[in-house]
Amino acid sequence: MTTDRTTDRTTDRLAVRKTYKLYVGGAFPRSESGRSYPVSSSKDELLAHAAQASRKDLRDAVTAARKAFPGWAAATAYNRGQVLYRVAEMLEGRREQFAAEVSAAEGGSAKSALTLVDEAIDRWVYYAGWADKYAQVAGGTNPVAGPYFNFSLPEPTGVVGIVAPQDSSLLGLVSVLAPALTTGNTVVVLAAETRPLPAVSLTEVLATSDLPGGVLNLLTGRVAELAPWLASHRDVNAIDLTGIDAPDRAPLQIAAADNVKRVFVPRSTNWSDDPGITRLDAFVETKTVWHPIGV
Amino acid sequence: MAIFDYAPAPESRDIARLRPSYQIFVDGAFRDGSGEAVKTINPADEAPLAEVAEAGPSDVDDAIKAARRAADPWAALPGKDRGKYLFRIARAIQERGRELAVLESLDNGKPIRESRDVDIPTAAAHFFYYAGWADKLGYAGFGPSPRPIGVAGQIIPWNFPLLMAAWKIAPALACGNTVVLKPAETTPLTALVLAEIIAEADLPRGVVNVLAGGPAIGQALVEHDGVDKIAFTGSTDVGKTIQRTLAGTSKRLSLELGGKAANIVFDDAPLDQAVEGIVNGIFFNQGQVCCAGSRLLVQESIADELIDALKRRLSTLRVGDPLDKNTDVGAINSAAQLARIRELSDSGEAEGATRWSPPCELPDRGYWFAPTVFTGVSQANRIAREEIFGPVLSVLTFRTPDEAIEKANNTPYGLSAGVWTEKGSRILSMANRLRAGVVWANTFNRFDPASPFGGYKESGFGREGGRHGLEAYLDH
Amino acid sequence: MRTGSYDGRVTVTSDRSTLHDVTRDDSSLRRFLHGLPGVDQVGAEARAAGLATRSIKTSAKAWAIDTAIAMVDLTTLEGADTPGKVRSLCAKAMRPDPGDVSVPPVAAVCVYPDLVATAVDALRGSSVQIASVATAFPSGRASLETKLHDVRDAVAAGATEIDMVIDRGAFLAGHYLQVFDEIVATKAACGGDAHLKVILETGELATLDNARRAAWLALLAGGDFIKTSTGKVTPAATPPVALVMLQAVRDFADLTGDVRGVKLAGGIRTSKEAVRYLVMVNEVAGEQWLDPRLFRFGASSLLNDLLQQRHKMATGAYDGPDYVTVD
C-alpha cells in the first residue's frame, strides 16, 4: 500500500516517500516559511509531514488566483466542463491510491473509502456536466415593459476562499471545490488541517488535468492561523466557511464584511446527499444587460 | 429672457392630501411611535411638511412580534390569495398615483415628472409583477416547494422612497414572509401612505409593519433576535456594519449598496442618444441614485465634440420647483447630503479638475446644487472614486476598449455600467468584461420589475427584481 | 414676443470648405453620410417623448399658438383643387380669423404648380409667400428634365418657394450623388429668388439613420429647408423624425455657420402637437429656429385648431368648429 511509509511488502523494496507540498499558481512550492507539520492517520500513526503555509503563502495564492481569474472566467463553459471531466478521468485511474489515502486519513474500511473516492469522482462528473447548463438554468431573458432586449446571466464571483471540511478529506473537498470552479471562479482552498494528504494528492491530479495554473490553489496548514487572513483579504470576493465550526465563524464573517464578501455557510454537510445547485448559486453574480430594440 | 419662456406649470400640492401628522403602522394599526415626534421637511424650501411620530425601541419589538405572529398564517395562506392582496396594493397605488407622486416630490425634492412617470408607476408595477409569482413559486427554480424565510427587516433609503418600499415588500410578501419596513428618516411619508393602502387592502394584521425612524431604529431592527432576514439598501459603509452585526447569527442578508458607475462612450456611438443617456445617467433624481453614471469615460477622439454637445444639452435643463411639471432637476434631499456633495465637488476643484455648470438660478431657500461637470479628471481624484450621490459628473477619457474596461472596473464598486457604441460585437464584449450587476448598452437608468438589479463587489449581494429577486426571500 | 411673418430668406455667409470634398464622388459622399453618428431609434423616441411632457401654459402657450400660426404653410394638394378653392385658402392665409385682426397671417400657401398664378393673384400685397410643390410631386417618378420643367413652371408663375421631393428610390439604392445632383439642379432651376424646401419623405426612408443621412444630403446640396413629408405617405412628420432633422440643421449650422430651416408636414392637426414641436425646436435646435424663416408647419386643418385654441385662451370657454372658417 502506498500509505505504508517503510517498505513495499510484496517486494521488500524500500519505498520512495512523497513530499506533500502546497499548490500555488500551478506549481508545488514548499511554504515560504519553511515550516511543515506532522500529519497522522486516524490511528495516530505518522503519515507524512505537510507544508505549513504562512499568511505570505496565502497572499501568493490569492495573487495567483486573481491572475488566473480572467482566463478561467472567460473560458467557454464547454471547455471548463471538459477540464472538470478530465479531472474525473485522472482520478478514476488512481482510485486505489486515493482510497488508501482517504482510509488512512479518515479511518474506516478500504471498501467504504473506495466508495467515498468513487463518489468524489462522480461529483466531478456531475459538475462537469453543469458547466455548460448552469447559465441556462440560472439566467434567461427578462420581459421588460419597453423596447429593450434584457437578459440576465450568472457570472463567477471572482476569487473564492474556501475552508474545506475538516472531516471529509476528499469527497467533502471535491464537493466544495468543484462547484466554485464550474462557474468560472478561481479558488484558494485551505485543506482539512489534520487530513490534508488526499487534498495534496488531488492537486497533483489537477495539475495534470488541463486546469490552468492558479485556478485552484491549495494550502495546507493551521486553519486558525490562515482563515482570518483569507477572510480579511480584500482581493478575495467570497468565502466558504464550511470547514469552520459554527462558534468560530463570527470573527471571520466580521472580517469578511470589510469588502462585502459573499459568505457561504453550508446548511448540510452530508456529502453523500444530492448536491443540488446550492453551491453553484453561492458563488455567482447575476449580470443583467439591457439593449434597445430598434431599426 | 428667452423667447419661449415656459410659464410655471406647478402640480397642486393639495393633491398630496398632506396631513399635519403621520403615524407608524404596527400590527395592523396606526399609532404614535414611542420615539420623538419629528418634522419632515420639504427640501425644496425647508418648510416643515408634517410631523411624524417616530418609532422607539419598544415599537421595533412590537412590530417584530406582530410580524412573527402573522408569519405562519401568512405563509400558510394559498399563494393565489397572497397574490390577490398584492394585486390589490398594485391597483391602489395606481389609483392614488397622482397623490403619491406629489407627496413623494414634496418629501424628497425630486421633480414631479420623475415621481409621476417613474417612481410611482414602477412601484405599482413591482407589486403587480410579484403578485403573479405568489402562487407559482414552485416554478421559480428554487425547488418544488420553497418556503419563506420568516420575518424580514427591511431598511430603505431616501432616494426612491416608495419605489424602494415596493422593491422590498412585494417579493417578501409574495414568497410568504412578513415584514417590518423602515423608511429613511427624511422621507417617511409615502411609505406611511403605503401602509394605509395596505390596511385598506385588508392584509392580515402584522404582515406589514412600517416604522418611521432614524439609524437607531434601523440598528434595533438589525440586532433584534426576532428577525430572520435583513434586506438593506443604502450606503456601503452602513451595509458593512450590518454585515458585521449579523456575523455569527443565522439571519440572512441581502445588500444593495453604493456605486460609481462608468458610462463608456465610444467614437462610433449614437452621439445624440449618448448625450441623453449621460444626462439621464447622472442627473436623474439629482444624481442621488446608487447606479448613477457618475463617471463618463469618453473615447479621446470624440471627447471635445461630446463634451460640447453635453454642455449644450445641460443648458436646457430646468432646475427648480420639484412640483413644476417642467422641472428636470429638483432639490437635494437634505442639508447633510448637500454638504457632502459640496465637499466632494470642492475637492474636485482642489485636485485640479475643471468645474463647469450651466447658468441656472437656484432658489434662495432649500437644498440646491447646480448640475455640474468636471473635466480633466484622473482616476486618482476623489470625485472619480467616491460616490458623490449628487448631480456631479466626472469626465475621464480612454483610448482603447481595454483601457476603458480597466478604468471602468478599477473601483471597489460594481453596481452598474453603460456602454455606447453602434458595434454589436463590441457591446457584447464590453458587457462581458464589465464587473457590474447591470449593464446598460445604448441606454441608461432603465428599471423594470422583471429585470434583476444588484451589485458585484462592494455594491452588495442579492438581486431585486425578476425571478432572481425571489431568492432573497425564499428558504431553499 | 416675436410672431413675425416671413420676410425673406435668412442670409448667412457659407463656409463649407470642410465639406467640399465629401460631394466629390459617390463613394466620398457615401463615406461621409455613413460616417455620421448613428441614431438609436429607441433613444430618439424616448427623447422625443420626454420633450412632449413639457407643460406649456398661459402666456407661453399664447405666444406659441401665434408663433405656430405664423409658421403655417397653409396647404391644399388635392386633385380636386380649383381656383376657387385656392382663392378661399389665400383669403384665410392672409386673415386667418376674420373676427380678430391680431391673428398673424400664415407664412405661405402651398399649392400645385398650375394654381400658383391664382395664388399670386389672390395674395398680392400680402406678406404671405407662395409655395409650390414640384418635381413630379409626390412620387418624384419622372425624368429629371420633366421635374426641372415642373420647377421652372412654378417659379415662372410666381412661386417664391419650391417644395421638391427627393428620389427616394435612388436614395435607397445608395445612389447618393444622383440625389445630390438632382437637388443641386433643382436649386439652380429655382433661380436666385425662390427658395428650396427638400422633401425627404422620411416615411419611405424607413429608418432614422436614413432620415439623418438624407437630411445632411439635402443640406449639402443647398436645400434651404429640409422637409419631412409630402403628406401623401404614412407615417409623415413624427416626433423622432423631427428630432433627427432638427439635430441635422443644428449640427450643420455648427459645422458650416450656415443656418437652414425645417418644415414638418403631414399629420399635424392639433395645437397640442404644434406646441410640442415648438418645444422641440426650442430645446433641440435652439431658439434661433423659433422663426417662420427657419421653421414651418405644412398643414391644412392645424390652422383651425390653433384658432380654436386661441379663442379658448381669450374667452376661457371651449370653442366649437362653427366659430372658425372652413376652407
Image (spheres, coloured by chain):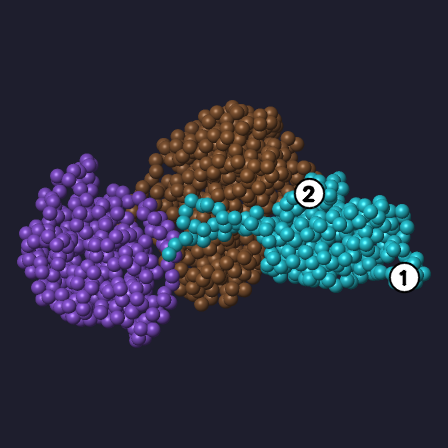
Chain colours: A cyan, B brown, C purple
Q: Residue at x 33, y 45 (%)?
A: C53
The one of B337 and C277 positioned closer to us in this rendering: C277
Please, what is the three-letter code of the amino acid marked with disc 1? Ala
Q: Chain of mark 1?
A: A
Q: Residue at x 9, y 58 (%)?
A: C115
Residue C21: x %, y % from top left? 32, 75
Residue C54: x %, y % from top left? 32, 46
- Classify mark 2: helix, strand or loop: loop
The one of C30 and C282 positioned closer to us in this rendering: C30
The one of B176 and B338 positioned closer to us in this rendering: B176
Please, what is the three-letter code of the amino acid marked with disc 2? Asp
Which quadrant holds the C terminus of chain B? Answer: top right
Residue under numbered circle 1: A15
Q: Is residue A79 above or below residue B101?
A: below
Residue under numbered circle 2: A274
Residue C162: x %, y % from top left? 16, 63
Report the side of C240 relative to A202 (left or right): left
